[in-house]
Protein backbone atom coordinates (compact mmCIF):
# COMPACT_ATOMS: atom_id res chain seq x y z
CA UNK A 1 0.00 0.00 0.00
CA UNK A 2 2.73 2.47 1.06
CA UNK A 3 6.26 1.23 0.71
CA UNK A 4 9.40 3.07 1.82
CA UNK A 5 12.64 1.64 0.48
CA UNK A 6 15.71 3.33 1.98
CA UNK A 7 13.85 6.62 1.61
CA UNK A 8 15.45 9.69 3.15
CA UNK A 9 14.24 13.22 3.51
CA UNK A 10 16.34 16.34 4.07
CA UNK A 11 15.39 19.93 4.69
CA UNK A 12 17.89 22.65 3.88
CA UNK A 13 19.02 22.42 7.50
CA UNK A 14 20.04 18.78 7.16
CA UNK A 15 18.68 15.25 7.03
CA UNK A 16 15.49 14.68 9.01
CA UNK A 17 14.60 11.11 8.09
CA UNK A 18 17.27 8.66 7.04
CA UNK A 19 16.97 5.51 4.94
CA UNK A 20 13.51 4.46 6.06
CA UNK A 21 12.42 1.06 4.87
CA UNK A 22 8.97 -0.15 5.81
CA UNK A 23 5.69 -1.24 4.32
CA UNK A 24 2.32 0.00 5.46
CA UNK A 25 0.00 -2.96 5.16
CA UNK A 26 -3.67 -2.60 4.23
CA UNK A 27 -6.21 -2.58 7.03
CA UNK A 28 -3.65 -1.93 9.80
CA UNK A 29 -3.75 0.73 12.49
CA UNK A 30 -0.45 2.53 13.02
CA UNK A 31 0.56 5.00 15.65
CA UNK A 32 3.46 7.26 14.74
CA UNK A 33 5.15 8.59 17.83
CA UNK A 34 8.29 10.48 18.62
CA UNK A 35 9.46 13.73 20.17
CA UNK A 36 8.48 17.09 18.72
CA UNK A 37 10.46 17.87 15.60
CA UNK A 38 11.42 14.25 15.04
CA UNK A 39 9.71 14.13 11.65
CA UNK A 40 6.25 12.67 12.32
CA UNK A 41 4.52 15.29 10.15
CA UNK A 42 7.19 14.95 7.45
CA UNK A 43 6.68 11.19 7.43
CA UNK A 44 2.89 11.60 7.04
CA UNK A 45 3.37 14.24 4.34
CA UNK A 46 5.49 11.76 2.43
CA UNK A 47 2.69 9.22 2.81
CA UNK A 48 0.32 11.40 0.80
CA UNK A 49 2.85 12.77 -1.65
CA UNK A 50 3.13 16.29 -0.26
CA UNK A 51 6.86 15.70 0.16
CA UNK A 52 9.08 13.54 -2.00
CA UNK A 53 12.06 11.58 -0.64
CA UNK A 54 15.43 13.06 -1.55
CA UNK A 55 16.84 9.59 -1.97
CA UNK A 56 15.53 6.04 -1.91
CA UNK A 57 12.18 4.97 -3.19
CA UNK A 58 8.62 5.55 -2.06
CA UNK A 59 5.71 3.73 -3.63
CA UNK A 60 2.11 4.53 -2.89
CA UNK A 61 -0.53 2.15 -4.24
CA UNK A 62 2.25 0.49 -6.22
CA UNK A 63 3.39 3.65 -8.01
CA UNK A 64 6.73 5.33 -7.61
CA UNK A 65 6.02 8.76 -6.20
CA UNK A 66 8.95 10.39 -7.98
CA UNK A 67 7.60 9.34 -11.35
CA UNK A 68 4.17 10.81 -10.70
CA UNK A 69 3.03 14.17 -12.03
CA UNK A 70 1.26 16.71 -9.83
CA UNK A 71 -2.07 15.59 -11.25
CA UNK A 72 -1.22 11.93 -10.68
CA UNK A 73 -0.55 12.75 -7.03
CA UNK A 74 -3.82 14.68 -6.85
CA UNK A 75 -5.73 11.69 -8.23
CA UNK A 76 -3.94 9.40 -5.77
CA UNK A 77 -4.94 11.64 -2.87
CA UNK A 78 -8.59 10.94 -3.58
CA UNK A 79 -7.87 7.57 -2.03
CA UNK A 80 -6.20 9.02 1.05
CA UNK A 81 -8.02 11.01 3.72
CA UNK A 82 -5.88 13.51 5.61
CA UNK A 83 -6.57 15.21 8.94
CA UNK A 84 -4.14 17.81 10.25
CA UNK A 85 -3.78 19.22 13.74
CA UNK A 86 -4.43 22.67 12.25
CA UNK A 87 -6.99 21.51 9.75
CA UNK A 88 -7.78 23.93 6.99
CA UNK A 89 -11.14 24.57 5.39
CA UNK A 90 -12.57 26.89 2.83
CA UNK A 91 -13.77 29.46 5.30
CA UNK A 92 -16.59 31.03 3.29
CA UNK A 93 -18.27 27.65 2.70
CA UNK A 94 -20.33 26.00 5.41
CA UNK A 95 -19.45 22.72 7.10
CA UNK A 96 -21.67 20.62 4.82
CA UNK A 97 -20.21 22.10 1.64
CA UNK A 98 -16.68 21.66 2.95
CA UNK A 99 -17.37 18.03 3.82
CA UNK A 100 -18.92 17.37 0.39
CA UNK A 101 -16.07 19.06 -1.46
CA UNK A 102 -14.01 15.87 -2.08
CA UNK A 103 -17.01 14.42 -3.94
CA UNK A 104 -17.20 17.49 -6.15
CA UNK A 105 -13.46 17.42 -6.76
CA UNK A 106 -13.50 13.76 -7.75
CA UNK A 107 -16.37 14.41 -10.16
CA UNK A 108 -18.85 12.29 -8.26
CA UNK A 109 -22.48 13.15 -7.90
CA UNK A 110 -23.51 14.75 -4.65
CA UNK A 111 -24.72 12.33 -2.04
CA UNK A 112 -28.10 11.57 -3.52
CA UNK A 113 -29.96 10.76 -0.37
CA UNK A 114 -29.39 13.20 2.39
CA UNK A 115 -29.55 10.31 4.81
CA UNK A 116 -25.92 9.42 4.11
CA UNK A 117 -24.74 12.93 4.83
CA UNK A 118 -26.95 13.11 7.89
CA UNK A 119 -25.55 9.79 9.06
CA UNK A 120 -22.03 11.03 8.54
CA UNK A 121 -22.73 14.29 10.39
CA UNK A 122 -24.38 12.37 13.19
CA UNK A 123 -21.46 9.92 13.31
CA UNK A 124 -18.97 12.77 13.80
CA UNK A 125 -21.37 14.64 16.10
CA UNK A 126 -21.88 17.68 13.87
CA UNK A 127 -25.53 17.19 13.00
CA UNK A 128 -26.54 20.51 14.49
CA UNK A 129 -23.57 22.39 13.03
CA UNK A 130 -23.95 21.57 9.35
CA UNK A 131 -24.71 25.16 8.36
CA UNK A 132 -21.95 26.74 10.42
CA UNK A 133 -18.90 28.31 8.82
CA UNK A 134 -15.51 26.78 9.74
CA UNK A 135 -14.32 29.83 11.73
CA UNK A 136 -17.39 29.39 13.94
CA UNK A 137 -16.37 25.85 14.95
CA UNK A 138 -14.49 24.87 18.08
CA UNK A 139 -11.20 22.94 17.87
CA UNK A 140 -12.90 19.59 18.38
CA UNK A 141 -15.63 20.38 15.88
CA UNK A 142 -13.03 21.33 13.30
CA UNK A 143 -11.23 18.03 13.82
CA UNK A 144 -14.46 16.08 13.44
CA UNK A 145 -15.42 18.08 10.34
CA UNK A 146 -11.98 17.31 8.91
CA UNK A 147 -12.53 13.65 9.69
CA UNK A 148 -15.90 13.67 7.93
CA UNK A 149 -14.30 15.36 4.91
CA UNK A 150 -11.46 12.85 4.95
CA UNK A 151 -13.78 9.83 4.85
CA UNK A 152 -16.56 11.03 2.54
CA UNK A 153 -14.79 9.59 -0.51
CA UNK A 154 -14.35 6.30 1.34
CA UNK A 155 -10.55 6.36 0.99
CA UNK A 156 -8.41 3.33 1.69
CA UNK A 157 -5.99 5.18 3.96
CA UNK A 158 -6.64 7.72 6.71
CA UNK A 159 -3.69 9.87 7.80
CA UNK A 160 -4.18 11.86 10.99
CA UNK A 161 -1.48 14.24 12.15
CA UNK A 162 -1.91 15.02 15.86
CA UNK A 163 -5.68 15.31 15.48
CA UNK A 164 -6.09 15.41 19.25
CA UNK A 165 -3.47 18.09 19.79
CA UNK A 166 -5.92 20.93 20.24
CA UNK A 167 -8.79 19.16 21.97
CA UNK A 168 -9.57 17.96 25.49
CA UNK A 169 -9.27 14.35 26.64
CA UNK A 170 -12.93 13.58 26.15
CA UNK A 171 -12.83 14.83 22.55
CA UNK A 172 -9.55 12.96 21.97
CA UNK A 173 -11.25 9.74 23.02
CA UNK A 174 -14.19 10.50 20.73
CA UNK A 175 -11.90 11.12 17.74
CA UNK A 176 -9.89 8.00 18.47
CA UNK A 177 -13.11 6.01 18.68
CA UNK A 178 -14.10 7.28 15.22
CA UNK A 179 -10.71 6.30 13.78
CA UNK A 180 -10.95 2.85 15.38
CA UNK A 181 -14.40 2.43 13.82
CA UNK A 182 -12.95 3.33 10.43
CA UNK A 183 -10.15 0.82 10.92
CA UNK A 184 -12.70 -1.86 11.79
CA UNK A 185 -14.40 -1.03 8.49
CA UNK A 186 -11.15 -2.02 6.76
CA UNK A 187 -9.46 1.36 6.42
CA UNK A 188 -5.75 1.70 7.03
CA UNK A 189 -5.15 4.34 9.69
CA UNK A 190 -1.90 6.17 10.42
CA UNK A 191 -2.19 8.37 13.46
CA UNK A 192 0.68 10.60 14.56
CA UNK A 193 0.52 11.38 18.25
CA UNK A 194 2.84 11.76 21.19
CA UNK A 195 0.01 11.10 23.65
CA UNK A 196 0.90 7.74 25.22
CA UNK A 197 -2.37 7.44 27.12
CA UNK A 198 -4.20 7.68 23.81
CA UNK A 199 -2.00 4.92 22.39
CA UNK A 200 -2.69 2.73 25.41
CA UNK A 201 -6.40 3.35 25.02
CA UNK A 202 -6.29 2.48 21.33
CA UNK A 203 -4.36 -0.72 21.95
CA UNK A 204 -7.11 -1.90 24.26
CA UNK A 205 -9.59 -1.68 21.38
CA UNK A 206 -7.61 -2.45 18.25
CA UNK A 207 -4.46 -4.25 17.15
CA UNK A 208 -2.37 -1.11 16.76
CA UNK A 209 1.26 -1.03 15.70
CA UNK A 210 3.44 1.72 17.05
CA UNK A 211 6.11 3.28 14.89
CA UNK A 212 8.61 5.46 16.70
CA UNK A 213 10.59 8.14 14.94
CA UNK A 214 13.75 9.26 16.71
CA UNK A 215 17.28 10.17 15.64
CA UNK A 216 16.27 10.24 11.94
CA UNK A 217 15.22 6.58 12.10
CA UNK A 218 11.82 4.91 12.25
CA UNK A 219 11.46 1.82 14.41
CA UNK A 220 8.60 -0.51 15.30
CA UNK A 221 7.72 -0.54 19.02
CA UNK A 222 11.08 -1.26 20.48
CA UNK A 223 12.47 -3.34 17.62
CA UNK A 224 14.41 -2.10 14.59
CA UNK A 225 12.52 -2.33 11.35
CA UNK B 1 -5.74 22.33 -26.24
CA UNK B 2 -6.88 19.58 -23.87
CA UNK B 3 -6.42 21.97 -20.95
CA UNK B 4 -8.61 24.57 -22.63
CA UNK B 5 -11.23 21.89 -23.29
CA UNK B 6 -11.18 20.89 -19.61
CA UNK B 7 -11.51 24.54 -18.61
CA UNK B 8 -14.38 25.05 -21.02
CA UNK B 9 -16.21 22.01 -19.68
CA UNK B 10 -15.49 23.34 -16.20
CA UNK B 11 -16.87 26.72 -17.20
CA UNK B 12 -20.18 25.29 -18.30
CA UNK B 13 -20.24 22.52 -15.72
CA UNK B 14 -23.35 21.93 -13.65
CA UNK B 15 -21.01 21.62 -10.67
CA UNK B 16 -21.76 24.90 -8.97
CA UNK B 17 -19.31 24.13 -6.15
CA UNK B 18 -16.45 24.47 -8.56
CA UNK B 19 -16.32 28.26 -8.50
CA UNK B 20 -17.89 28.54 -5.08
CA UNK B 21 -14.53 27.57 -3.64
CA UNK B 22 -13.23 30.96 -4.76
CA UNK B 23 -14.30 33.66 -2.28
CA UNK B 24 -17.04 35.75 -3.91
CA UNK B 25 -15.80 39.07 -2.59
CA UNK B 26 -12.51 40.83 -2.11
CA UNK B 27 -10.22 43.26 -3.84
CA UNK B 28 -9.61 41.08 -6.90
CA UNK B 29 -13.32 40.43 -7.35
CA UNK B 30 -14.16 44.11 -7.22
CA UNK B 31 -11.26 45.00 -9.50
CA UNK B 32 -12.43 42.52 -12.13
CA UNK B 33 -16.00 43.72 -11.97
CA UNK B 34 -15.01 47.39 -12.10
CA UNK B 35 -12.43 46.95 -14.87
CA UNK B 36 -14.70 44.90 -17.09
CA UNK B 37 -17.61 47.30 -16.57
CA UNK B 38 -15.49 50.31 -17.49
CA UNK B 39 -13.91 48.54 -20.44
CA UNK B 40 -17.29 47.34 -21.67
CA UNK B 41 -18.60 50.89 -21.40
CA UNK B 42 -15.64 52.41 -23.26
CA UNK B 43 -15.59 49.72 -25.91
CA UNK B 44 -19.23 50.31 -26.79
CA UNK B 45 -18.50 54.02 -27.18
CA UNK B 46 -15.42 53.31 -29.29
CA UNK B 47 -17.47 50.94 -31.40
CA UNK B 48 -20.22 53.52 -31.86
CA UNK B 49 -17.65 56.12 -32.86
CA UNK B 50 -15.98 53.74 -35.26
CA UNK B 51 -19.25 52.74 -36.90
CA UNK B 52 -20.40 56.37 -37.14
CA UNK B 53 -17.11 57.37 -38.80
CA UNK B 54 -17.36 54.44 -41.19
CA UNK B 55 -20.92 55.44 -42.08
CA UNK B 56 -19.82 59.00 -42.66
CA UNK B 57 -16.92 57.89 -44.87
CA UNK B 58 -19.29 55.73 -46.91
CA UNK B 59 -21.79 58.55 -47.23
CA UNK B 60 -19.23 61.10 -48.31
CA UNK B 61 -17.72 58.64 -50.69
CA UNK B 62 -21.07 57.69 -52.23
CA UNK B 63 -22.62 61.12 -52.28
CA UNK B 64 -19.71 62.89 -53.89
CA UNK B 65 -18.38 60.14 -56.05
CA UNK B 66 -20.96 60.68 -58.79
CA UNK B 67 -21.03 64.43 -58.81
CA UNK B 68 -18.83 67.27 -60.05
CA UNK B 69 -19.08 71.04 -60.33
CA UNK B 70 -18.05 73.30 -63.15
CA UNK B 71 -17.34 76.84 -61.98
CA UNK B 72 -17.21 79.52 -64.68
CA UNK B 73 -15.75 82.87 -63.70
CA UNK B 74 -15.85 85.28 -66.59
CA UNK B 75 -16.73 88.92 -67.28
CA UNK B 76 -20.50 89.33 -67.13
CA UNK B 77 -20.82 89.96 -70.89
CA UNK B 78 -19.09 86.62 -71.62
CA UNK B 79 -20.56 84.57 -68.84
CA UNK B 80 -23.79 83.42 -70.54
CA UNK B 81 -21.90 82.57 -73.70
CA UNK B 82 -19.37 80.46 -71.83
CA UNK B 83 -22.14 78.74 -69.85
CA UNK B 84 -23.92 77.78 -73.06
CA UNK B 85 -20.71 76.45 -74.55
CA UNK B 86 -19.97 74.51 -71.40
CA UNK B 87 -23.45 72.96 -71.37
CA UNK B 88 -23.07 71.97 -74.97
CA UNK B 89 -19.74 70.28 -74.23
CA UNK B 90 -21.14 68.53 -71.17
CA UNK B 91 -24.14 67.21 -73.12
CA UNK B 92 -21.84 65.55 -75.61
CA UNK B 93 -19.46 64.14 -73.03
CA UNK B 94 -19.87 60.41 -72.46
CA UNK B 95 -20.49 59.48 -68.84
CA UNK B 96 -22.45 62.58 -67.90
CA UNK B 97 -26.08 61.94 -67.10
CA UNK B 98 -27.17 65.46 -66.32
CA UNK B 99 -25.74 68.98 -66.17
CA UNK B 100 -27.72 71.90 -64.80
CA UNK B 101 -26.88 75.50 -64.03
CA UNK B 102 -27.52 76.53 -60.44
CA UNK B 103 -30.06 79.33 -60.22
CA UNK B 104 -29.90 82.25 -57.82
CA UNK B 105 -31.90 80.49 -55.11
CA UNK B 106 -29.65 77.47 -55.20
CA UNK B 107 -26.60 79.71 -54.95
CA UNK B 108 -28.20 81.53 -52.04
CA UNK B 109 -28.71 78.22 -50.22
CA UNK B 110 -25.09 77.31 -50.83
CA UNK B 111 -23.83 80.60 -49.43
CA UNK B 112 -26.31 80.88 -46.60
CA UNK B 113 -24.11 79.18 -43.97
CA UNK B 114 -21.43 81.79 -44.56
CA UNK B 115 -23.28 84.95 -45.56
CA UNK B 116 -26.64 84.52 -43.90
CA UNK B 117 -30.06 84.53 -45.52
CA UNK B 118 -30.58 88.26 -45.95
CA UNK B 119 -27.61 89.11 -48.17
CA UNK B 120 -28.65 90.28 -51.67
CA UNK B 121 -26.39 87.90 -53.56
CA UNK B 122 -27.87 89.04 -56.88
CA UNK B 123 -25.76 92.16 -56.42
CA UNK B 124 -22.60 90.09 -56.06
CA UNK B 125 -20.51 89.08 -58.97
CA UNK B 126 -20.63 85.37 -58.51
CA UNK B 127 -19.33 82.74 -60.90
CA UNK B 128 -21.80 80.50 -62.69
CA UNK B 129 -22.01 77.02 -61.25
CA UNK B 130 -22.99 73.94 -63.21
CA UNK B 131 -23.88 70.84 -61.24
CA UNK B 132 -22.79 67.68 -63.06
CA UNK B 133 -24.23 64.26 -62.32
CA UNK B 134 -22.31 61.31 -63.66
CA UNK B 135 -23.88 58.13 -64.94
CA UNK B 136 -22.80 54.66 -63.79
CA UNK B 137 -19.70 54.63 -65.99
CA UNK B 138 -18.49 58.10 -65.03
CA UNK B 139 -16.64 60.56 -67.26
CA UNK B 140 -13.02 61.16 -68.12
CA UNK B 141 -12.30 64.31 -66.12
CA UNK B 142 -8.88 64.97 -67.72
CA UNK B 143 -10.33 64.83 -71.22
CA UNK B 144 -13.20 67.10 -70.21
CA UNK B 145 -10.79 69.61 -68.69
CA UNK B 146 -8.86 69.80 -71.96
CA UNK B 147 -12.05 70.40 -73.95
CA UNK B 148 -13.25 73.05 -71.52
CA UNK B 149 -9.84 74.75 -71.50
CA UNK B 150 -10.16 75.34 -75.21
CA UNK B 151 -13.77 76.59 -75.34
CA UNK B 152 -14.55 77.80 -71.82
CA UNK B 153 -11.43 79.61 -70.64
CA UNK B 154 -13.08 80.74 -67.38
CA UNK B 155 -14.19 77.22 -66.44
CA UNK B 156 -12.75 75.23 -63.59
CA UNK B 157 -13.89 71.63 -63.26
CA UNK B 158 -14.02 70.35 -59.74
CA UNK B 159 -14.78 66.63 -59.51
CA UNK B 160 -14.54 66.91 -55.67
CA UNK B 161 -11.63 64.48 -55.60
CA UNK B 162 -9.36 67.13 -54.16
CA UNK B 163 -11.32 67.53 -50.94
CA UNK B 164 -13.37 64.36 -50.99
CA UNK B 165 -10.38 62.05 -50.68
CA UNK B 166 -8.88 63.61 -47.49
CA UNK B 167 -12.32 63.61 -45.86
CA UNK B 168 -12.96 60.00 -46.68
CA UNK B 169 -9.44 59.10 -45.56
CA UNK B 170 -9.92 61.05 -42.31
CA UNK B 171 -13.24 59.35 -41.61
CA UNK B 172 -11.70 55.98 -42.42
CA UNK B 173 -8.82 56.70 -40.05
CA UNK B 174 -11.23 57.73 -37.32
CA UNK B 175 -13.08 54.46 -37.81
CA UNK B 176 -9.82 52.50 -37.67
CA UNK B 177 -8.79 54.47 -34.58
CA UNK B 178 -12.03 53.38 -32.89
CA UNK B 179 -11.30 49.74 -33.70
CA UNK B 180 -7.69 50.14 -32.57
CA UNK B 181 -8.98 51.61 -29.29
CA UNK B 182 -11.12 48.50 -28.83
CA UNK B 183 -8.02 46.39 -29.42
CA UNK B 184 -6.07 48.39 -26.84
CA UNK B 185 -8.89 48.13 -24.33
CA UNK B 186 -9.05 44.39 -24.91
CA UNK B 187 -5.34 44.20 -24.11
CA UNK B 188 -5.76 46.39 -21.04
CA UNK B 189 -8.67 44.21 -19.88
CA UNK B 190 -6.54 41.10 -20.29
CA UNK B 191 -3.73 42.69 -18.27
CA UNK B 192 -6.02 43.86 -15.47
CA UNK B 193 -7.91 40.57 -15.24
CA UNK B 194 -4.63 38.65 -15.23
CA UNK B 195 -3.42 40.87 -12.39
CA UNK B 196 -6.67 40.38 -10.47
CA UNK B 197 -6.66 36.61 -11.01
CA UNK B 198 -3.06 36.31 -9.86
CA UNK B 199 -3.78 38.47 -6.82
CA UNK B 200 -6.84 36.34 -6.03
CA UNK B 201 -4.88 33.12 -6.30
CA UNK B 202 -2.03 34.46 -4.19
CA UNK B 203 -4.54 35.61 -1.58
CA UNK B 204 -6.23 32.22 -1.60
CA UNK B 205 -3.34 29.83 -1.12
CA UNK B 206 -5.33 28.26 1.72
CA UNK B 207 -8.15 27.43 -0.69
CA UNK B 208 -5.64 25.97 -3.13
CA UNK B 209 -3.90 23.89 -0.45
CA UNK B 210 -7.26 22.56 0.82
CA UNK B 211 -8.25 21.63 -2.73
CA UNK B 212 -4.93 19.91 -3.34
CA UNK B 213 -5.22 18.06 -0.04
CA UNK B 214 -8.54 16.55 -1.09
CA UNK B 215 -7.26 15.55 -4.52
CA UNK B 216 -8.08 18.45 -6.82
CA UNK B 217 -6.09 18.48 -10.02
CA UNK B 218 -4.59 21.69 -11.40
CA UNK B 219 -7.28 21.70 -14.09
CA UNK B 220 -10.01 21.63 -11.43
CA UNK B 221 -8.44 24.44 -9.39
CA UNK B 222 -7.76 26.52 -12.49
CA UNK B 223 -11.29 26.01 -13.77
CA UNK B 224 -12.70 27.22 -10.45
CA UNK B 225 -10.83 30.51 -10.77
CA UNK B 226 -11.38 30.74 -14.54
CA UNK B 227 -15.11 30.20 -14.13
CA UNK B 228 -15.38 32.74 -11.33
CA UNK B 229 -13.35 35.41 -13.14
CA UNK B 230 -14.80 34.82 -16.61
CA UNK B 231 -18.37 35.01 -15.40
CA UNK B 232 -17.59 38.05 -13.28
CA UNK B 233 -15.88 39.80 -16.21
CA UNK B 234 -18.76 38.83 -18.48
CA UNK B 235 -21.35 40.24 -16.11
CA UNK B 236 -19.31 43.41 -15.46
CA UNK B 237 -18.83 43.98 -19.19
CA UNK B 238 -22.52 43.33 -19.83
CA UNK B 239 -23.42 45.95 -17.25
CA UNK B 240 -21.00 48.50 -18.73
CA UNK B 241 -22.16 47.76 -22.26
CA UNK B 242 -25.83 48.10 -21.40
CA UNK B 243 -25.22 51.46 -19.73
CA UNK B 244 -23.10 52.65 -22.67
CA UNK B 245 -25.64 51.44 -25.25
CA UNK B 246 -28.38 53.25 -23.32
CA UNK B 247 -26.35 56.45 -23.23
CA UNK B 248 -25.47 56.16 -26.92
CA UNK B 249 -29.15 55.79 -27.71
CA UNK B 250 -29.95 58.76 -25.48
CA UNK B 251 -27.30 61.14 -26.81
CA UNK B 252 -27.69 60.11 -30.42
CA UNK B 253 -29.03 63.20 -32.24
CA UNK B 254 -32.11 62.68 -34.33
CA UNK B 255 -31.54 65.81 -36.40
CA UNK B 256 -28.38 65.08 -38.33
CA UNK B 257 -27.09 61.55 -38.57
CA UNK B 258 -24.30 62.65 -40.87
CA UNK B 259 -22.35 64.64 -38.37
CA UNK B 260 -19.64 62.92 -36.37
CA UNK B 261 -20.85 64.61 -33.19
CA UNK B 262 -24.54 63.91 -33.48
CA UNK B 263 -24.27 60.72 -35.50
CA UNK B 264 -22.41 58.63 -32.90
CA UNK B 265 -24.51 55.55 -32.37
CA UNK B 266 -25.82 52.41 -33.94
CA UNK B 267 -28.31 51.96 -36.74
CA UNK B 268 -30.46 48.94 -37.43
CA UNK B 269 -28.54 45.70 -37.12
CA UNK B 270 -25.52 47.59 -35.81
CA UNK B 271 -27.26 47.42 -32.43
CA UNK B 272 -26.24 43.76 -32.34
CA UNK B 273 -22.57 44.69 -32.17
CA UNK B 274 -22.57 45.77 -28.49
CA UNK B 275 -23.68 42.23 -27.60
CA UNK B 276 -20.27 40.99 -28.69
CA UNK B 277 -18.39 43.31 -26.32
CA UNK B 278 -19.21 41.38 -23.09
CA UNK B 279 -18.57 38.13 -24.95
CA UNK B 280 -15.19 39.45 -26.08
CA UNK B 281 -14.29 40.50 -22.53
CA UNK B 282 -15.53 37.15 -21.18
CA UNK B 283 -13.32 35.28 -23.65
CA UNK B 284 -10.37 37.53 -22.82
CA UNK B 285 -10.97 36.90 -19.10
CA UNK B 286 -11.16 33.17 -19.74
CA UNK B 287 -7.74 33.01 -21.38
CA UNK B 288 -6.15 35.62 -19.09
CA UNK B 289 -7.27 33.77 -15.96
CA UNK B 290 -6.26 30.43 -17.42
CA UNK B 291 -2.76 31.76 -18.10
CA UNK B 292 -2.52 33.34 -14.64
CA UNK B 293 -3.81 30.18 -12.92
CA UNK B 294 -1.36 27.98 -14.77
CA UNK B 295 1.50 30.22 -13.77
CA UNK B 296 0.49 30.55 -10.10
CA UNK B 297 -0.23 26.82 -9.68
CA UNK B 298 3.16 26.06 -11.23
CA UNK B 299 4.83 28.47 -8.80
CA UNK B 300 3.06 26.97 -5.79
CA UNK B 301 4.38 23.53 -6.79
Image: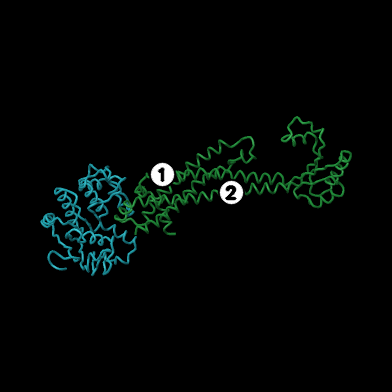
Chain colours: A cyan, B green
Q: As rendered, which of B192 and A95 lies closer to the eye?
A: B192
Identify the residue shown where x is 74% and y is 31%: B117
Q: Are marks 2 and 1 on the same chain?
A: yes
**Residue A150 got which mark?**
none
Q: What residue is shown with label 1?
A: B30
Q: As rendered, which of B264 and B3 lies closer to the eye?
A: B264
Labels 2 and 1: the sequence-earlier one: 1
Q: What residue is shown with label 2?
A: B177
Q: Return the x and y of residue B78 as percentages of the image width and height.
A: 88, 41
The answer to whether mark 2 and mark 1 are in CB contact below 8 A is: no
Badge 1: chain ID: B
Q: Return the x and y of residue B272 as percentages of the image width and height.
A: 55, 44
Q: Return the x and y of residue B230 as percentages of the image width and height.
A: 43, 49
Count of numbered badges drawn on the protein: 2
Answer few, some or many: residues within 10 Å of disc 1's Cα (few below 14, many 20 plus, some between 14 and 19).
some
Identify the residue shown where x is 16% and y is 55%: A180
Quarter of the image with the C terminus of chain A in it: bottom left
Amino acid sequence: MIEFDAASYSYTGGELLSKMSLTITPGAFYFITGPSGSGKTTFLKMCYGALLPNSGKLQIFGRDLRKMTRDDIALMRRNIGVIHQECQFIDHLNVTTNILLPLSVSGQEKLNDNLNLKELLTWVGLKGRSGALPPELSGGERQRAALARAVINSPEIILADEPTGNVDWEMSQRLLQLLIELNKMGKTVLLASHDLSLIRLAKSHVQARVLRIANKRITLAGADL
Amino acid sequence: MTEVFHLLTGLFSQDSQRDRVVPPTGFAANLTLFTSSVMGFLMVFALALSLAAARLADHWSDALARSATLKIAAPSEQLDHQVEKALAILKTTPGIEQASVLDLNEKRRLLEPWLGSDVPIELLSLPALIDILEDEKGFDSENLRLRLFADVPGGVLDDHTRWRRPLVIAAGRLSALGLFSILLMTGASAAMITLAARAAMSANTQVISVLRLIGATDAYIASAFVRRFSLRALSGAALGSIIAAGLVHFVNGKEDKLSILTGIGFEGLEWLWPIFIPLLIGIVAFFATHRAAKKVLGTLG
